[in-house]
């Protein structure tokens, strides 16, 4: 009757503690995502440290601003694929509205200058009318 009235599950009395705990664990697995979140991404020997907002390459590292971190994070997640300007703008500023067309270009230029300091010249590839992609070193 409980199931017919909309219950997801029930336990009959007298209940077995092992069965009860197993059912609770199954419910928690279905409700919450307990997977460990990846804190570091690697592309072509470059390691992106998400929690530290740093990029390491050849024992050198650079600090990234929040926007630079978001840009490079999206590019690392899509390694080998081009990411459109609109997708990056939406990710970084959560909107396509009220953002100057030059804003992404300015941030990309700053990021490229930082990458050059640690020997990553031409790491971010640009394809006109397509977008940006992290390339091979």
Image (cartoon, rainbow, N blue to C red):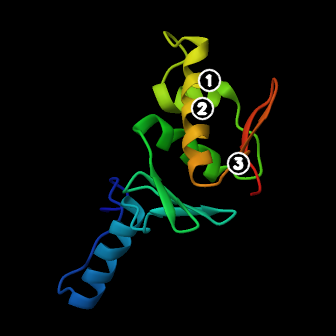
Q: Could you say which is closer to the camera, residue 23 or residue 116?
A: 116
Q: Can you identify the residue that label 1 sits on?
A: 105
Q: Where is residue 99 in the image (x, y as percent from the top left)?
A: 51, 13
Q: Can residue 104 be seen in this view?
A: yes
Q: Where is residue 67 in the image (x, y as percent from the top left)?
A: 46, 35
**Structural distance between the alpha carbons of marks 3 and 2:** 12 Å
Q: Is residue 134 left or right of residue 41?
A: right
Q: In which quarter of the image is residue 33?
A: bottom left
Which element carries disc 2, helix, strand or loop? helix
Q: Residue at x 61, y 39 (%)?
A: 112
Q: Can residue 16 be seen in this view?
A: no
Q: Can you identify the residue that label 3 sits on?
A: 123
Q: Are marks 2 and 1 in contact (CB under 8 Å)?
A: yes
First-in-chain label (3 vs 1): 1
Total labels: the figure holds 3
Q: In which quarter of the image is residue 41?
A: bottom right
Q: Which residue is drawn at 18% across and 82% down?
A: 13
Quadrant, the N terminus: bottom left
Q: Are marks 3 and 1 in contact (CB under 8 Å)?
A: no
Q: Could you say which is closer to the camera, residue 101 or residue 14?
A: 101
Q: Can you identify the residue that label 2 sits on?
A: 108
Q: Could you say which is closer to the camera, residue 96 or residue 17?
A: 96
Q: Could you say which is closer to the camera, residue 10 or residue 111?
A: 111
Q: Is 36 drawn above or below residue 13 in the view shown?
A: above
Which element carries disc 1, helix, strand or loop? helix
Which element carries disc 3, helix, strand or loop? loop
- How would you rate the neighbour count of disc 1 (Cα within 10 Å): few for under 14, some for 14-19, many for 20 or more? few
Q: Residue at x 48, y 64 (%)?
A: 38
């Amino acid at each position: 009757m409980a199931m017919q009235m909309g219950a997801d599950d029930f336990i009959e009395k007298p209940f077995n503690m092992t069965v009860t705990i197993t059912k609770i664990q199954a419910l928690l697995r279905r409700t919450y995502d307990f997977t460990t979140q990846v804190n570091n991404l690697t592309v072509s020997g470059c390691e992106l440290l998400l929690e530290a907002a740093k990029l390491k390459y050849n024992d050198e590292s650079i600090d990234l601003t929040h926007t630079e971190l978001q840009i490079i994070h999206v590019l690392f997640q899509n390694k080998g694929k081009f990411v459109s300007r609109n997708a990056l703008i939406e990710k970084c500023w959560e909107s396509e509205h009220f953002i100057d067309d030059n804003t992404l270009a300015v941030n990309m230029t700053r990021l490229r200058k930082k990458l050059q300091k640690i020997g990553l010249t031409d790491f971010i590839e640009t394809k006109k009318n397509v977008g940006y992609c992290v390339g091979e070193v």
